[in-house]
């Protein structure tokens, strides 16, 4: 557990805006855990975040989900630690997802499959990113898009040596390890 925590990326996160389908959010959590993200921000006005452990491979045990009532609150939370916000959003200003720097403190903002990110969320983002599509469809499933972009972030961070030494403060690493050990089943 401490080995996994030593690779956590405290300055990389996801903001999931109105991702209502539990299996999609669970799959996003699984990708987050796979690249070392320990905290995800979820915007769901009714509160609560449903997950299916069969989809997430129990990732919800290892990734903390902070629930926000609105997207501006979620963005404000990540801005407090200096994060840039990259919205997965098809717009005239959008750039290829591989062209942005994921080695800076950053958050990937994702919307639901039906509507994408809201106009408010798009306006709050520092930059819009897209995954180039060469077929007839214009987008991927939200959880697939999250995985594609997050593994680019991981590639950049591996190259920069971000996984070579713990990035969490030792006290925080130990506190999380104790919580994990206490709930392990």
Image (cartoon, rainbow, N blue to C red):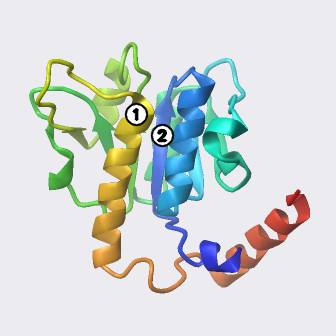
Which residue was labeled with disc 2? 15
Dot 1: few (<14), some (14–19), or many (≥20) neighbours within 10 Å? many
- As helix, strand or loop, the secondary structure at mark 2 comes to strand
Q: Is residue 5 left or right of residue 34?
A: right
- Residue 74 is situated, as x and y percent measured from the top left of the image, at 52, 38
- Residue 105 is situated, as x and y percent measured from the top left of the image, at 38, 62
Which residue was labeled with disc 1? 110
Dot 2: few (<14), some (14–19), or many (≥20) neighbours within 10 Å? many
The residue under the point 26% across, 25% down is: 139
- As helix, strand or loop, the secondary structure at mark 1 comes to strand
The residue under the point 37% across, 20% down is: 118
- Residue 84 seen in render: no
Q: Is residue 155 left or right of residue 25?
A: left
Q: Is residue 63 left or right of residue 136?
A: right
Q: Work out whether 4 lies above or below 82.
A: below
- Residue 44 is situated, as x and y percent measured from the top left of the image, at 60, 24
Task: Depth check: give the residue in front, 50 or 168.
Answer: 50
Q: Is residue 69 left or right of residue 52?
A: left
Quarter-of-image position of residue 12: bottom left
- Nearer-N-terminus badge (2/1): 2
- Residue 156 is situated, as x and y percent measured from the top left of the image, at 28, 67
In the picture, the disc for residue 154 is none
Disc 2 to disc 1: CB gap under 8 Å: yes
The residue under the point 88% across, 56% down is: 185
Q: Residue lying furthest bottom in this view?
A: 165
What quarter of the picture does the N terminus occupy?
A: bottom right
Q: Residue lying furthest top in this view?
A: 114
């Amino acid at each position: 557990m401490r080995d996994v925590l030593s690779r956590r990326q405290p300055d990389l996160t996801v903001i999931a805006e109105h991702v209502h389908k539990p299996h999609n959010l669970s799959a996003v959590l699984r990708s987050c855990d796979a690249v070392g993200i320990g905290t995800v921000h979820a915007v769901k006005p009714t509160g609560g975040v449903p997950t299916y452990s069969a989809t997430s491979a129990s990732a919800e045990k290892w990734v903390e989900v902070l629930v926000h009532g609105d997207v501006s609150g979620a963005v404000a939370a990540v801005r407090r630690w200096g994060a840039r916000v990259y919205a997965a959003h098809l717009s005239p200003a959008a750039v290829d997802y591989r062209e942005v720097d994921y080695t800076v403190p950053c958050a990937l903002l994702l919307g639901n499959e039906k509507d994408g990110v809201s106009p408010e969320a798009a306006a709050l983002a520092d930059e819009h990113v897209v995954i180039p599509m060469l077929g007839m469809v214009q987008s991927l499933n939200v959880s697939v898009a999250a995985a594609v972009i997050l593994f680019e972030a991981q590639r950049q961070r591996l190259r920069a040596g971000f996984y070579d030494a713990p990035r969490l403060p030792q006290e925080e690493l130990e506190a999380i390890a104790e919580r994990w050990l206490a709930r392990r089943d």
